[in-house]
Amino acid sequence: MTAAAAFALLTVLVTTSAPLGIDHTAFEALHDIRAPWLDHAARVVTTFGLFAIVGPSVLVAALLLIRGHERIRAAALVAGCGLAWLSVQIVKGAVDRARPPAPLVHATGASYPSGHAANSVGWLALAIGVTVLAPSGRWRVAVVAAGLG
């Protein structure tokens, strides 16, 4: 419920402020700490937010869950990720927010909500979903920590 309220508030801010106003403030705040190595790290992290990476990973995890006799968990994982993707597309179409200038990586289409941010939640969902396959509590903690990364 808190996440939904935060998303609604951010959507109101994004749709009622000057175009890219919030982005401009963030870019100004981060300008002084930019460095080539940080840009490279951001590009690598961004790659893991691509649906082309997250989607197949979710499908592989679902197959592993099915093999482990966790069909309901597998279905919930795939359905949740599918609904997240669909929700992002619907809101992107409704808001139609321009992308900020000078991006680190090439992207097309509307910028809000962030598909990369939504896909990063997919990694956490995947990690939590497959914890039932982990042999011990330590492995479960490690899997969830990896999903948070």
Image (tube, grey):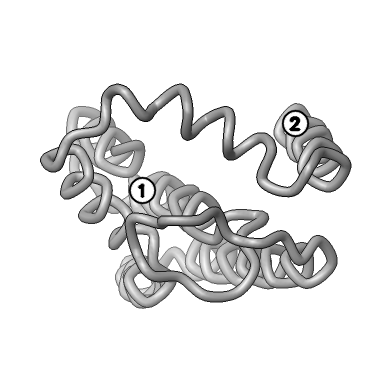
Residue at left 66%, top 35%?
A: 22
* Place of residue 37 in the rendered image (x, y in percent of width and height, measured from the top left): 11, 40
Closest to the observer, 135 or 143? 143
Q: How far apart are marks 2 and 1 (CA)?
A: 24 Å
Closest to the observer, 65 or 93? 93
Q: Which mark is residue 70?
A: none
Q: Earlier in the sequence, mark 2 or mark 1?
A: 2
Residue at left 27%, top 24%?
A: 33
Q: In this view, does 47 lie above or below 138?
A: below
Image quadrant assignment for residue 72: bottom right
* Place of residue 14 in the rendered image (x, y in percent of width and height, measured from the top left): 77, 43
Is the C terminus in the top left, top right, bottom left or bottom right quadrant? Answer: top left
51 sits left or right of 84 in the view: left
Is the N terminus in the top left, top right, bottom left or bottom right quadrant? Answer: top right
Image quadrant assignment for residue 25: top right
Q: In this view, does 99 lie above or below 117?
A: below
Disc 1 marks which residue? 127
* Place of residue 108 in the rendered image (x, y in percent of width and height, measured from the top left): 52, 75
32 sits left or right of 126 in the view: left
Kind of residue at disc 2: Ala
Query: Could you tell me which secondary element the residue under label 2 belongs to?
Result: helix
Closest to the observer, 141 or 56? 56
Kind of residue at disc 1: Ala
Which residue in the rendered view is the most extreme toward the left?
Answer: 37
Dot 1 alpha-carbon crowd within 10 angstroms: few under 14, some 14 to 19, many 20 or more: many
Image quadrant assignment for residue 21: top right
* Place of residue 9 in the rendered image (x, y in percent of width and height, measured from the top left): 82, 33
Q: In this view, does 94 lie above or below 149?
A: below
- The mark closer to the camera, 2 or 1, is 2
Residue at left 39%, top 27%?
A: 30
Disc 2 marks which residue? 6
Mark 2 and mark 1 in contact? Answer it, CB < 8 Å.
no
